[in-house]
Image: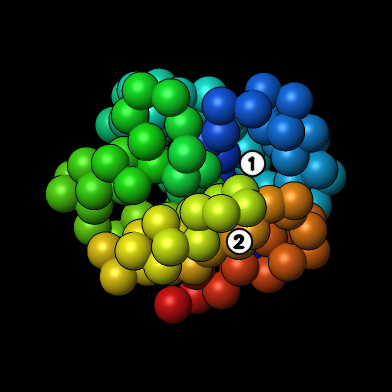
Amino acid sequence: MKQLKILLVDDEEDLTSTMVERLGLRDFQVEAATSGIDALKRVSEGDFDVLVLDVKMPGIGGLQVMAEIKRQHLDLPVILLTGHGSAADAERGMKEGASDYLMKPIDIDTLVEKIRNAVQS
């Protein structure tokens, strides 16, 4: 199986750097973005297999980013990350085309499973 290329988008830089490292150790190729604007730019320039996207970010939020990406790249699976209290946003995201969602704090093994499932569907 080819190495999957993931774009991880979250405004929490500590979380992002930790997740990039942990996913890299599991043989994924991971790039990070810390804003919705950066995510849109990277998706337009790169060829990603999966987008892991935080729902709540300053500026352009995750649902808005996902809507724009889905207009341009319909086949790119999106997994939403959501903190406590924003499960309704994640459910809305699922209705709007997300492959799955995870509540923070993130369990790395669950995320890996969801990434692999998203690519296979």
Tell me the kind of residue under disc 1: Gln
Residue found at the far front of this picture: 85
Q: Nearer the viewer, residue 25 or 1?
A: 25
Q: Position of residue 6 (x, y in %)?
A: 55, 45
Q: Where is residue 53 in the image (x, y as percent from the top left)?
A: 49, 45
Question: Which quadrant of the rendered structure holds the C terminus?
Answer: bottom left
Q: Where is residue 56 in the image (x, y as percent from the top left)?
A: 47, 39
Residue under pointer 1: 29
Q: Which mark is residue 50?
A: none
Residue under pointer 2: 102
Secondary structure, mark 1, is: strand
Please state if 91 lies on the left or on the right of 25 as rendered: left
Task: State whether residue 84 is above or below residue 99.
Answer: above
Total labels drawn: 2
Please state if 21 lies on the left or on the right of 98 as rendered: right
Q: Is residue 52 visible?
A: yes
Q: Which of 116 and 18 is in front in this view?
A: 18
Question: Which quadrant of the rendered structure holds the N terminus?
Answer: bottom right
Residue appearing at x 33%, y 29% in the figure: 60
Q: Which of 26 and 97 is in front in this view?
A: 97
Residue appearing at x 50%, y 75% in the figure: 120
Please state if 55 lies on the left or on the right of 12 as rendered: left
Residue appearing at x 43%, y 24% in the figure: 58
Q: Is residue 98 visible?
A: no
Other residues around mark 2 within 10 Å, as few (<14) / some (14–19) / many (≥20)? many
Tell me the kind of residue under disc 2: Leu
Task: State whether residue 74 is above or below residue 57.
Answer: below
